Amino acid sequence: MDLSIYLNMMFSAAWYLIPIFIFSVIIRSAWFKGVLGEWQVNLLIKFFLDKKDYHLIKNVTLPTFTDGKEQGTTQIDHIIVSKYGIFVLETKNMKGWIFGSANQKQWTQQIFKHKSKFQNPLHQNYKHIKTLEVCLRIKSDAIFSVIIFIGDSTFKTKMPENVRFARGGINFIKSKTDVIFNAEEVTNIIEKIESGRLARGFKTNRGHVKHVKEIVKEKTDGKLCTQCGSNMVLRKATKGKNAGNEFWGCSTFPMCRNVIEN
């Protein structure tokens, strides 16, 4: 066979593999897992909560303030406004065993023998709730924090009642039956959130990601991953030109491959 024909065939085959490779990288990324988890929660809300009583507002980015000055942003997956209160949802799409308690700063995910840390989602949602309090000027007892885990995960420690798996989060929302707001107040709350949120788009998302990375860097002095927030582990390279050198690698490797030189 002519070599040029053979090479052309190889290049043609390679072009078919490139999209497959890109797709496989995307579906394994933390971003895709987050989007998939939020989509699944959207379906749960759509099928199991009556739209007449529960109004869903998705992907809300709000400015945060310190001493009256704007200091970055906070991003909320789902806000559900109803006469029974305001429900702030944080979604976690994870697999494996999950260990944690309400007061721990970090929880643990275990997949077989591999363990990794992640921020306590209750603490993460606390900032969301406090931002909403300022935005809406209402008391905290009218706002409920709800953590919904999606994926092939199992709680291995007793969780607070507002930390649920999948449809359990919907059941928690339905368990609140005391009427807090009248119809006019519900409408006003929805309008305040919609008017106070930052415009959706790449610029807003990029600004929020930058703000989160700055917070992580300031609080951890480089000991937490700036990509996913998990612990960084001191490791030693065993191969290549850097063999023998120490470096900080993300504890969730290979899910996150972030590296910081020591």
Image (cartoon, rainbow, N blue to C red):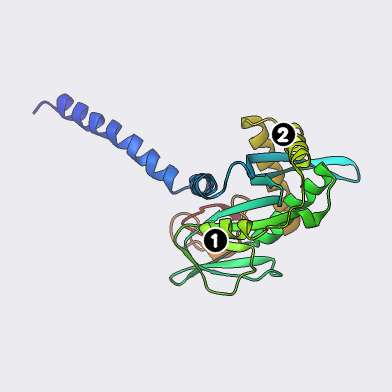
Per the image, label 1 sits on a secondary structure element best described as: helix
Rendering coords of residue 10 (x, y %)? 22, 32
Which residue has dot 2 on it? 194
Rendering coords of residue 45 (x, y %)? 55, 47
| Quadrant where the image shows the N terminus | top left
Per the image, label 2 sits on a secondary structure element best described as: helix
Res 92 → quadrant: bottom right
What is the spatial separation of the Cα atoms under label 2 and label 1, in whole angstroms? 28 Å
Which residue has dot 1 on it? 168
Residue at image position (11%, 25%) is 2
Residue at image position (63%, 52%) is 89
Amino acid residing under circle 1: Gly
Classed neighbour count for the residue bearing mark 2: other residues with Cα under 10 Å, few (<14), some (14–19), many (≥20): some
| Quadrant where the image shows the C terminus | bottom right
Q: Is residue 49 visible?
A: yes
Classed neighbour count for the residue bearing mark 1: other residues with Cα under 10 Å, few (<14), some (14–19), many (≥20): some
Q: Quick one: which residue is furthest to the right in this view?
A: 67
In terms of sequence position, does the residue under pointer 2 or pointer 1 come before the other? 1
Amino acid residing under circle 2: Glu
Q: Is residue 221 visible?
A: no
Side of 217 relative to 152 (left or right): right
Side of 1 relative to 218 (left or right): left
Q: In this view of the protein, which residue sits in the foreground, 161 or 213?
A: 161
Rendering coords of residue 113 (x, y %)? 45, 72
Residue at image position (64%, 31%) is 200
